[in-house]
Amino acid sequence: MGLIPQAVIEEVLARTDILETVRQYVALKRAGSNYKGLCPFHDENTPSFNVHPGMGIYKCFGCGEGGNALQFLMAIEGWSFPETVRNLAERAGVEIPEESPEEAEKARKRREGRKVYLDIMASARAFFEKNLWGEPGAAARLYLKERDISEETARQFGLGYAIDGWDHLLHHLTGEGYKPEWLERAGLVMKKDRGGHYDRFRHRVVFPVVDVWGNTLAFGGRTLATESKGAKYINSPETPFYTKGEELYGLDVAKRSIQKEEYALVVEGNFDVIALHDAGVDVTVAPMGTALTEDQTRLMRRFARRVVIAFDGDSAGEEATLRCMGALEKAGLEAMVIRFVDGDDPDTFVRREGVEALQSKIDNARPLMAWALDRVIRPVEGAAIEVRVGALEDVAQLLDEVKDRVTWDHYAREAARRLDIDPGQMKNYLRRPEAARAEVKQQVHRSHQGAKLTSAEYGVLVVLLDHPEWLSDFFREELDKLLGSHDLARLLNLARDHYEANQEINRPLLIEEIKAVPLRETITRALAEPERGELYPPDQSLRWYRDCVWALKKRWAQRMAAILEKELVEVDFRTDRDRYVELTEQLKEVQQFEQALNLEGARPEQVKSHAG
């Protein structure tokens, strides 16, 4: 491709409305003769981004970004200058000279083909709309009324009706001069086996698919015949000018509200979109498929920073929700999810419960990753060790989608907590599943062999059962995190609940709630410790407790230092310097903590072995 002549660039700029261009990405409000909004190039709470339609420029007085429509699109889309000019030229109908006659002819044909395509689609949409609001559309209007779709909303979305017949649209469009072959390539008619064509959409409510610039690109249709043997929903096929994975149904209507509210509600079907808009939830859009694509999430990123997935309550909706994770993560969108009971969807939920109930669900939406992990972990919590370790494969696959290190670390720790696996071992497994699997299994087995407590753990157990009034301070100081046994930590938490509820520990009930037999035997012995006088003198219980805590801290520091040293060996300083520095600092802090313990001068030799 050759250089684009300056005269062509100037013509493209002259035909481009900068206000309309910027509005596809920024919510703007009039400020005198200009418009203001929050800058898309830096974080701010007070609008400092200005658009001057008369001058054809934009300027942010916060970060300094500014320029014309070309420079705006280059900055926000990352397009090159030629890409930007050609994109705007196609929209504005400006011809760009090509380097060779062949390229020029190819570009001309595509430009003319796109114009004809959009004209055909506009004519088809007008025909469908006329049918809906005229005499042929009586049954379709009744159907919309039964679905609680108002006329105002139906007109806003350009709904129409395809007449019950084989060639009504075909005759209408050929009468306007469009060839049947063109209509076939546009996906509006289909070829008969014996020659000729027939309408694709027949006796259906028709939904136009419109891009953010207002161009009708395709249609979807919902049958009115309950006894119909055909598909309930049919859609236009993809064409050279329409790719379903690049568009979002309803975005042309919802984009202003999405910009204002800073989030989008994504549902599965066209009717869900229309029904929710009719109910006042006008941030609703739908993918043109069963899950979001990367192109669709990039498109949404222009208008929103947060996305709430609200797919149908069946298993298919659940699986589709999971498939959205990767695309949302790559787009840098905050991903949330709300779920419905099986057989429910957003439309039926709102009609039954009301829009306030849906808004409450949206306000309390869960992070998509937290929901996905819960879906994997919840069924195996408290199960056999082998079952829990088996869930690690699914956890690893989910966390592969998380690119932000802090977020990944948070969810890895949460998964470790719920699966009762040491966080360090969990991270080791997630980074190298095959190599770490056996080691993690051994760690899980060790952590759940309740009877094998260290001397310090057993000492803390005995003294806290003797002095349950100390349990609240034990947990307030987060000393439970020093324990190597997750079962012991849960047991002490249960003992605290017993004490806070009754000012005493119900020992038979406490023992009954312990599921692991070896731990139950250890706890029974601790509760009835016959040699407590040998373990520690009654007047020395506080000192004994502090010595045991000192030993727990010492063991924790040694364990953490070993984990960090191992991870440091595995980090490549040249390619991941930030991580190397972070680990070095963490190791230094742990070593300083251990040195402080040594200076504290506890007497761990007094912690006798009664772990059993």
Image (cartoon, grey):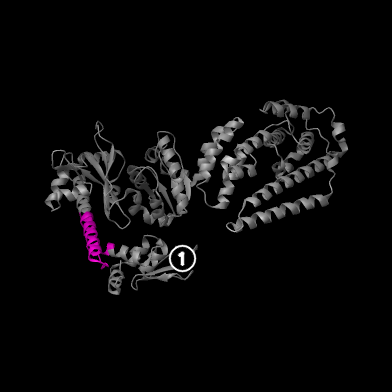
Q: Is residue 331 left or right of residue 91?
A: right
Q: Is residue 597 above or below residue 471?
A: below
Say left or right for 188 vs 54: left
- The type of residue carrying mark 1 is Pro
Residue at 13% in and 38% down: 194
Task: Classify the position of the C terminus by image quarter.
Answer: top right
Residue plotted at (21% across, 49% down): 185
Point 56% across, 33% down: residue:
380
Question: Compared to 356, does 112 lie above or below?
Answer: below
Q: What residue is at 45 percent from the left and 39 percent from the top?
A: 339
Q: Is residue 460 magenta?
A: no
Residue in the foreground of this view, choosing between 191 and 75: 191
Closer-to-camera residue (478/183): 183
| Quadrant of the snapshot with the N terminus | bottom left
Determine if residue 51 is in view.
yes
Residue with the mark numbered 1: 47
Where residue 359 sits in the image (x, y, percent)? 45, 45
Q: Provide residue 28's location: percent of width, then percent of height.
A: 39, 63
Direction from residue 146 to residue 57 in the image, left or right: right
Up-down: is 71 above or below 289? below
**In the rendered image, the vertical position of residue 463 relative to residue 404, given as above or below:** above
Q: Which residues are magenta?
A: 90-119
Q: How many marks?
A: 1
Which of the 4 quarters of the picture holds residue 578? Answer: bottom right
Picture coordinates of residue 365, whole percent (x, y): 49, 45
Task: Return the x and y of residue 162 as percentages of the image width and height.
Answer: 20, 43
